Amino acid sequence: MNALKKLFGGDTRQFGMIFALVALIVLFQWLTGGITLTPGNVINLFNGNSYILILAIGMVLVIIAGHIDLSVGSVAAFVGMVVAIAMRDWNIPWYLAILLGLGLGALIGAWHGWWTAYVGIPAFIVTLAGMLIFRGAQQFVGQSNSIPVPREFQYIGAGYLPEVGPNIGYNNLTLLIGLAAVAFVVYGEVRRRRTAKALGAEVPETWVVVLKLVLICAAILYATYLFATGRPGTSFPVPGLILAVMVLIYGFISSKTIVGRHVYAVGGNRHAAELSGVKSKKINFLVMMNMSIIAGLAGMIFVARSTSAGPSDGTGWELDAIAAVFIGGAAVTGGVGTVIGSIVGGLVMAVLNNGLQLLSVGADWQSMIKGLVLLVAVAIDVYNKTQGRASIIGLMMKNFNRPSGGPGTPLQPDEVTSTKETISREA
Amino acid sequence: MTIPTTQEEPVILEMRSITKEFPGVKALSNVSLRVKAGEIHAICGENGAGKSTLMKVLSGVYPYGSYEGDIVYQAEVQQFKDIRASEHAGIVIIHQELALIPELSITENIFLGNEPTKWGVIDWAEARKRSVELLARVGLREDPDTPIKEIGVGKQQLVEIAKALNKSVKLLILDEPTAALNESDSQHLLDLILGLKGKGITSIIISHKLNEIEQIADEITIIRDGKSIETLNVKRDGVDEDRIIKGMVGRTLESRFPDHVPKIGEVFFEVRNWTVGHPQIQDRLVCKNSNFFVRRGEIVGFAGLMGAGRTELARSVFGRSYGHFVSGQVYMDGKEVTLRNVHQAIEAGLGYVTEDRKSLGLNLLDDIKTTTVSASLEKISKRSVVDTNKEFAVAEQYRKSLRTKAPSVQEGVAKLSGGNQQKVVLAKWMFTEPELLILDEPTRGIDVGAKYEIYGIIQRLANEGKGVIVISSELPELLGLSDRIYTIFEGAITGVLNKEEASQESLMKLMTSARKAA
């Protein structure tokens, strides 16, 4: 026991949520008699959940900025429906249809963003209204019918990477992506470590980093193997690829760019951000607009996968996305959260869904179990924070994230004076 | 268990070798405190010395068992398990951050958690009657039905005391009661505490304002680094401010202000006819036709009572971040500039350090390095991508040059003491390389040693040829630091005095009258 403790040290918590995910996978692997980790099922899992994970990427930014978006399910459904109709009735090609969908999402997002940022209505209300408005609009334009979408369009939701190059029994492109991911992870870690050392910042011990890299790379390679060895015609799914690209882009934006910093600043303390020159209205507008664009994308992927747009598409998606973000360590009060964390949170829910379905657990039990998991995951996080330890996910994501001592730092018993004298009261 | 008492005055409270540890920190070690019945006992110490922790132990916030040592109160060893238990025994603590609910009325707040009932239903008639009596006792003339949010902080403080009196308090603990009050409200409060003493209520007061302590305290216990250093009897030992400071910092401070020979240059910043309206109330002006200027290398003070419009003036000039702009011009180096938002103000070379660090100045979720660069991200970015190496280097450089006490720049700002937080905020604004830095109450809630350092930083900025505006409620601070002082009364500038002609009296006169001076 001691040896185990020594081996993992403080990293047990650091990897807490990933461990939970792995434990869940192992549990279902055992309970289902090995069905969970078959190529077919893993591909299914990704295909069936990619749109929720994509939504979570937008949602985490909204939540970091201190808002919430309840409209994403309706917006996704509306965009999916309009795109389907556009392709059927106006015969526009699939790529124009995608652009149309993204543009429509941007318009809807601008609508939400305008009310939230410039009029000052809480996003909860604005998007609750949006949820009703766009659900209605979707049923209005679609006349509550199912509208099929053409074959080429289905590729973004149900397609796989093509076979190229010599036939070696695996899907070559999938292998290539897997190897590229491993190289990227290793290179990134080594580089980060080198610059941190050069600057004299704290760096974890070498063996910790090596162990971490080995574990991550093993996971990536195993996933690659699974995706590359599916039944003929399948490989790494296109929605998964879209998701991966989005994670890279948004992970980068949120942690490395000025806009990303500003989103955290606005969510952490809007007044302080404004007095530092951050245009908080612009940031709020952009965050809300971005969410609806992503919702539009998710809607199109879903429609493409299910080959038609239907009246009840997107029902309850907002809640799945929000749950993923909170399981992934974001704070309701804003200012805290990461893209990667939300993806892990989303995967926990996805694996749970998938495993329970494989076990033929009824929808009633599934819903209850998912609810409890959400509650327990957040409760553990809150408990750790109040105990003065850093949040599981906060610590775990330390390296993916802007390294921040922020979330969950214990307030020391000092005597920092804060005057409640705000000028509004003074006046 | 009996406790030894001196002949003349019985001891109401004795805390014996209190030790309190937090994970990794020993906040209190062997602290002893003896408070005589009916006296006003002050506790002095720098920030982080352990004063508030000691009071939290006493009031049961840290329950019996979580600390070592004994609390002997009214000749009995007490084992308070929570605040209710200590309140039941007659110990009431009033925190520096008031625990009143803004939306509720004075009466509702006084009786919150302690409502008089009749058949299980709140007896509001009785509550109101009693609150009228209590308000009379604390000298507050307000309708008891007034919502708390509509009365000023000074009056809110009185409501807190009325609430304490309602709990038949025997030992009243006040943590920084005057930190947010102006001079006259402070004086009223101190008089009230003296009055309560006359009625046999013992008080423990924690304050950074040493002149007030000197004025009202009978005894002073000094705490330094979690240890009780000494207890002074004000009358017998002839204690003055310098004596207290010596005990607090463990050495004598020769001067409370670093030596500074100003190198004052040309006028480079000027504001003319500045008029600003209240953000909510129409036709109400918070700045009335104000004119002022700043020279290079000059430290300009702004004196005024709380609510006089000092902060409003500063913030409205700083990119119109307060109120709605009515009229006025800003000139920099002789040219008129328009600063419509904070971004433009920063670009033009203005910086503004807020008076309220926690709610307006800092994102408490951030660490030191993120905070340091947060107002000048463009400087360390290329094509909108932040260079985190540069960020680290910049933060590290400021940490060293401002001597911020923190293990590393990755430390969260929430963990720092007030003085160090303020240094991080200063670093943030220094990194924007402002021509004019406006500091609003730069040393509020900061201990003596850190104050001295912050004064040094301000003077250094002035020596570099920048202009500095200091807004402060502490007149000695303004007098010690400024080369020139403007006075503000009800939104209008009522006068300007050079360092040589300014004194507490002359400033106070201008701060409290609408008389237009030269």
Image (cartoon, coloured by chain):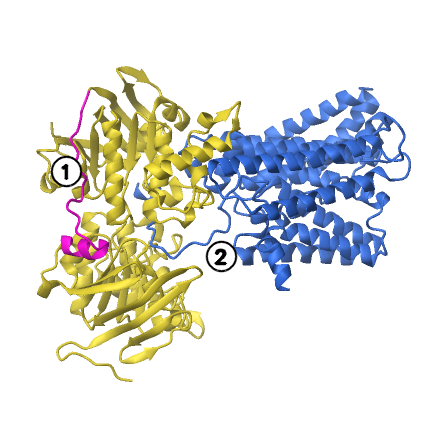
Chain colours: A blue, B yellow
Q: Quadrant of the C terminus of chain A?
A: top left
For disc 2, the marked residue is A388
Q: Is residue B314 above or below residue B410?
A: above
Q: Residue at x 33, y 47 (%)?
A: B418
Taking the magenta stretch, the answer to whether it contains residue A361 is no
Q: Position of residue A383 (x, y in %)?
A: 55, 58
Q: Position of residue A315 (x, y in %)?
A: 73, 43
SS majority, magenta: loop
For disc 1, the marked residue is B513
Q: Assign a secondary structure to mark 2.
A: loop
Distance between the Cα atoms at labels 2 and 1?
51 Å
Q: Residues within 10 Å of mark 1 (few under 14, many from 20)?
A: few
Q: Assign a secondary structure to mark 1.
A: loop
Residue stretch in magenta: B241-265
Can you name the residue that lies furthest to the bottom here? Answer: B1
Q: In which quarter of the image is the N terminus of chain A?
A: bottom right
> What's the chain of the residue with tag 1?
B
Q: Please state which of residues B237 and A322 is positioned toward the viewer in this rendering.
A: B237
